[in-house]
């Protein structure tokens, strides 16, 4: 493909494909092509005349050829005729365009408005006869296909053409990671400004009631989610939980179960978890357990929740005995990582999230480490208020996408953590023990950073990696502003907690260690003196 369209717009007759497409092109200073106009040039007559003379099958053939040509070599906005995506060869062309990174936008307008526009001016052979009845019949046939062949679905109800164009641009610029695999209902993690606008699409038409579970510090983002949900026609129960780890308890979960019961939540209703990783862990746990599992969507608002906590289906709560000891593997219907929410994120919580980002670099994607190295100074100085529209935003979006891809890779083939998924636990064996001993006052990502240095020391002591790689852990993590040592407890206490780690088997410890960057192995039952010596080395 030499060049490809910025976006291809599809939709019903009267949806505003030409009007909105032109507006998108104008805003981005790109050229615009309307397939119908192109076809008229090609055949040298108006479409209704061509239909009359040669019939629909001949028209569809010409249309498919014109579309294939434009898709192969055009850098602008391309809008298709209403029936074009019904042609199998065009469906294949669109699928290939998407595989190469293209965006097929389904412009979904209010049916009444669309019918009114479609009837205006006549000249639509497909609407001959009772135009509204024809439109509705065609809608019933085409809507499922439009959903299938598009990868961006834009509802334009109540929007001006400019508003709809802005929405198209926002949604086209978002990134998405598709998660699928055995035992997983496929879902997307959508990343970018305005991702939360997709809430109603992801929840779908079935739920009537939504439990919007969030914490107080993200109130302004939950207000936005509530508005979007109400606009989508849902009845919203606003549920505020205690902030951070105090929200991940059985008492909090029980309070929500009681409320769902009192408010008549059924199996077809849904949960939206919005906030940091603690809130999305708890919301997922409630969704997994209410009536043995209802639909849920996560709207993560911290970096750590975007890259890790909200995306892989591990839900849970803490107990007196330790971190995440009760929970369930239960995947969300979608994750909307709206980067506008990062504008209110405090610097220290952003930096904490970099701990899990670096982890994904160490275990699988070295490019993450290169990006972190190159941008360490800007990342360490993260300022939410200056973030949106800054060059850092693109860097962070790329880090989020790459990190989610690492997560998706491990989750896809091992949702229930039989082996491969355990690699995502790099740095966590000690990390979780530190969190517990610090009564959860230490942030999770910070504890994981120290835990990775510990795992690197252990791997070095046992001959898996050389000293340079241990030093590299320390240099990179501290350049990002993450801690690399801990002095808050005795080895005996740490050891006892590491024995309660979920990777432990019987009374044998199990660690995850590197044997090179991007390559991880299990380390079962390592020698006790190495386990202790590595601990001594992180105490400086
Ligand atoms: N399920 C998983 O796979 C998984 C993965 C990693 C971490 N986790 C869990 O996630 C939790 C850590 O997540 P976290 O680091 O997000 O901590 P957190 O949920 O405690 O959030 C940290 C703080 O930031 C606030 N906050 C979040 N987003 C904000 C925003 N946009 N603006 C202002 N304040 C905001 C929160 O309210 C909280 O006060 C831990 O409980 C950890 O165990 C789970
Ligand atoms: O998704 C996973 O699997 C992980 O291990 C990701 C970790 O980064 C995350 O902290 C997770 O919450 C740890 O889970 P746990 O099972 O060790 O409690």
Image (cartoon, grey):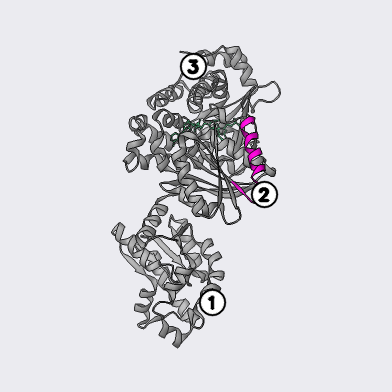
Q: Earlier in the sequence, mark 3 or mark 2?
A: 2
Residue 399 drawn at (x, y percent):
42, 39
Give the numbered dot on residue 133: 1
Identify the mark nearer the N-term, 1 or 3.
Answer: 1
Task: Count residues near mark 2 (Cα–Cα under 10 Å), then give few for <14, some for 14-19, many for 20+.
Answer: some
Residue 476 lies within the magenta run: no
Where residue 486 is drawn, which disc sits there? 3
Q: Is residue 406 visible?
A: yes
Residue under the point 55% across and 52% down: 234
| Vertical order, 35 against 239 (above or below) | below
Query: Of marks 2 and 1, which one's residue comes earlier in the chain?
Result: 1
Q: Magenta region: which residues? A: 250-270
Q: Nearer the viewer, residue 95 or 462?
A: 95
Tell me where residue 135 appears, x and y as whole percent.
51, 74
Residue 278 % position (x, y): 54, 33
Q: Quadrant of ligand 2?
A: top right
- Across and down, in percent, residue 82 comes to 46, 71
Q: Nearer the viewer, residue 489 or 269?
A: 269
Q: CA distance from mark 1 to mark 3?
A: 71 Å
User: Cα distance, mark 3 to mark 2?
Assistant: 46 Å
> Cβ(mark 2) to ligand 1 < 8 Å?
no
Local SS, label 3: loop
Taking the view exactly as shown, the residue that stands out farthest to the left is 29
The residue pinned by badge 2 equals: 267
Element class at badge 1: helix
């Amino acid at each position: 493909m030499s060049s490809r369209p910025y976006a291809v717009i599809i939709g019903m007759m009267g949806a505003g494909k030409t009007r909105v497409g032109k507006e998108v092109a104008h805003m981005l200073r790109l050229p615009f092509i309307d397939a119908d106009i192109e076809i008229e040039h090609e055949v040298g007559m108006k479409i209704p005349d061509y239909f009359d003379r040669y019939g629909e099958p001949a028209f569809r053939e010409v249309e498919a050829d014109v579309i294939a040509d434009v898709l192969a070599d055009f850098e602008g906005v391309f809008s298709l005729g209403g029936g074009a995506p019904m042609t199998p060869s065009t469906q294949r062309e669109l699928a290939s365009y998407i595989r190469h990174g293209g965006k097929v936008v389904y412009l979904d307008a209010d049916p009444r408005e669309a019918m009114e526009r479609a009837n205006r001016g006549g000249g639509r052979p497909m609407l001959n006869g009772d135009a509204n009845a024809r439109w509705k019949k065609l809608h019933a046939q085409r809507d499922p296909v439009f959903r299938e062949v598009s990868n961006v679905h834009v509802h334009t109800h109540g929007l001006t053409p400019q508003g709809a164009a802005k929405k198209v641009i926002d949604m086209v610029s978002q990134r998405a990671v598709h998660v699928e695999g055995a035992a997983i209902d496929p879902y997307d993690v959508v990343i970018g400004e305005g991702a939360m606008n997709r809430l109603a699409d992801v929840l779908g038409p079935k739920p009537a009631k939504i439990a919007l579970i969030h914490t107080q510090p993200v109130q302004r983002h939950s207000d936005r989610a509530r508005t979007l949900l109400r606009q989508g026609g849902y009845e919203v129960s606003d549920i505020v939980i205690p902030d951070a780890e105090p929200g991940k308890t059985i008492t909090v979960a029980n309070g929500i179960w009681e409320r769902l019961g009192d408010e008549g939540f059924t199996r077809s209703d849904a949960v939206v978890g919005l906030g940091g990783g603690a809130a999305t862990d708890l919301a997922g746990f409630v969704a997994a357990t209410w009536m043995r599992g209802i639909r849920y969507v996560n709207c993560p608002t911290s970096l750590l929740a975007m890259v890790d906590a909200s995306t892989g289906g591990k839900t849970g709560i803490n107990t007196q005995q330790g971190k995440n000891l009760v929970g369930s593997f239960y995947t969300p219907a979608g994750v909307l990582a709206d980067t506008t929410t990062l504008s209110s994120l405090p610097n220290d919580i952003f930096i904490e999230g970099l701990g899990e980002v670096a982890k994904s670099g160490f275990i699988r994607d070295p490019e993450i480490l290169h990006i972190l190295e190159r941008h360490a100074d800007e990342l360490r100085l993260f300022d939410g208020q200056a973030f949106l529209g800054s060059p850092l935003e693109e860097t962070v979006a790329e880090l989020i996408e790459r990190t989610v891809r690492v997560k998706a890779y491990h989750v896809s083939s091992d949702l229930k953590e039989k082996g491969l998924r355990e690699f995502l636990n790099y740095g966590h064996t000690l990390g979780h023990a530190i969190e517990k001993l610090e009564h959860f006052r230490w942030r999770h990502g910070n504890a994981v950073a120290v835990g990775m240095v510990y795992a690197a020391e252990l791997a070095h002591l046992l001959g898996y990696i050389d000293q340079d790689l241990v030093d590299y852990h320390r240099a990179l993590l501290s350049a990002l502003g993450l801690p690399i040592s801990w002095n808050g407890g005795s080895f005996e206490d740490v050891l006892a907690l590491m024995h309660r780690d979920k990777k432990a088997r019987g009374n044998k410890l199990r660690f995850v260690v590197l044997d090179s960057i991007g390559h991880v192995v299990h380390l079962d039952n390592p020698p006790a003196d190495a386990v202790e010596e590595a601990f001594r080395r992180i105490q400086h």
